[in-house]
Image: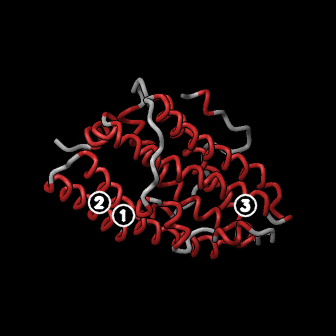
């Protein structure tokens, strides 16, 4: 029977598919780390109190990238080149979601609207990340090889999501409510489309590695399209709602290290 657990177990058990999975994940996390470091360096003076939290966010992303590399290293595997059609982070940037890398490579301070854009982009993508890691935690929290990493990354993603909720609400309460909601909606509708395309691409590459029959590949593709149809109709709304988190100031302290969890 096809299930999330059996699907991921198959990917985990095969060195080539596991290497591809970890390489894709590590690349996205490392890219997120770079983006957050640059945003922290360019925060406008009026929002300098945010810089340490953005820096912490970036440090967490870098740590996750190192963890995925460490998981490969433990099995004697080297990273592989990430197929362009599976590069979620770069595809979002290419479609104008979040802050353009050209802007982040410069030295011009960002604007308050730029920070709203960054937080809205993060709120949407961290929702996706938190849900994915919760799914893995549900099935693999006690796995001897990846369990500790799954639990730690899931905990971090929950913190990132709480931070985005709290900071976006702060901006909304200080007169940026319409900008926050408009930007969240734009990000969410674009993200669900790109997530669908990346999911289809990842499953295609995994299918080649694992030798899936056409019927299984077709069933997985149909499932991905069904998720997209739901998200396009109503599911995207979960990505734009805001509520004050129980865990306040979630990124107010130092980041843990990858060595603690691998």
Residue 139 relative to residue 250: left or right: left
Secondary structure type for disc 1: helix
Looking at the picture, tell me which residue is in the foreground, 74 or 62. 74
Please give the name of the residue rendered at 27% of the width and 38% of the height, measured from the top-left corner. Answer: 10
Looking at the picture, tell me which residue is in the foreground, 7 or 129. 7
**Residue under numbered circle 2:** 224
Closer to the chain start, of discs 1 and 3, is 3
Q: Does the residue at mark 1 contact the one at mark 2 (Cβ under 8 Å)?
A: yes
Q: Residue 103 got which mark?
A: none
**Residue under numbered circle 3:** 39
* Residue 249 visible to an observer of this rendering: no
Quadrant of residue 107 within the rendered picture: bottom right
Secondary structure type for disc 3: helix
Q: Quadrant of the N terminus?
A: top left
* Crowd tier of the residue under label 2, counting other residues whose Cα lies within 10 Å: few below 14, some 14–19, many 20 or above: some
Please give the name of the residue rendered at 77% of the width and 49% of the height, measured from the top-left corner. Answer: 52
Q: Quadrant of the C terminus?
A: top right
**Percent x, y for residue 199?**
36, 58
**Percent x, y for residue 187?**
52, 69
Real-space Cα separation, disc 2 to disc 3, in angstroms = 33 Å
**Residue under numbered circle 1:** 196
Q: Does the residue at mark 1 contact the one at mark 3 (Cβ under 8 Å)?
A: no
Please give the name of the residue rendered at 46% of the width and 60% of the height, measured from the top-left corner. Answer: 238
Closer to the chain start, of discs 2 and 3, is 3
Looking at the picture, tell me which residue is in the foreground, 221 or 78. 78
Closer to the chain start, of discs 1 and 2, is 1
Q: Residue at the right extreme?
A: 45
* Crowd tier of the residue under label 3, counting other residues whose Cα lies within 10 Å: few below 14, some 14–19, many 20 or above: many
Looking at the picture, does residue 167 appear above or below residue 70? below
* Residue 175 visible to an observer of this rendering: yes
Q: Does the residue at mark 2 contact the one at mark 3 (Cβ under 8 Å)?
A: no
């Amino acid at each position: 029977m096809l299930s999330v657990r059996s699907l991921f177990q198959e990917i985990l058990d095969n060195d080539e598919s596991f290497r591809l999975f970890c390489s894709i994940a590590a690349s996205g996390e490392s890219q997120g780390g770079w983006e957050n470091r640059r945003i922290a360096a360019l925060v406008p003076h009026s929002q300098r109190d945010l810089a340490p939290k953005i820096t912490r966010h970036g440090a967490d992303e870098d740590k996750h990238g190192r963890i995925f590399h460490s998981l490969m290293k433990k099995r004697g595997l080297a990273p592989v080149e990430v197929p362009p059609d599976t590069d979620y982070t770069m595809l979002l940037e290419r479609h104008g979601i979040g802050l353009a890398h050209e802007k982040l490579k410069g030295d011009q301070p960002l604007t308050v609207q730029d920070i709203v854009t960054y937080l809205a982009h993060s709120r949407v993508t961290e929702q996706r990340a938190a849900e994915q890691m919760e799914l893995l935690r549900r099935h693999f929290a006690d796995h001897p090889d990846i369990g500790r990493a799954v639990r730690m990354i899931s905990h971090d993603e929950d913190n990132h999501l709480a931070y985005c909720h709290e900071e976006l609400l702060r901006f909304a309460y200080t007169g940026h409510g319409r900008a926050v909601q408009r930007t969240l909606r734009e990000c969410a509708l674009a993200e669900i489309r790109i997530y669908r395309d990346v999911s289809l691409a990842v499953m295609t590459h995994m299918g080649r590695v694992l030798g899936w029959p056409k019927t299984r590949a077709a069933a997985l593709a149909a499932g991905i399209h069904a998720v997209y149809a739901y998200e396009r109709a109503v599911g995207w709304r979960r990505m734009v709602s805001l509520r004050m988190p129980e865990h306040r100031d979630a990124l107010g302290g130092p980041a843990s290290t990858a060595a603690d969890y691998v």
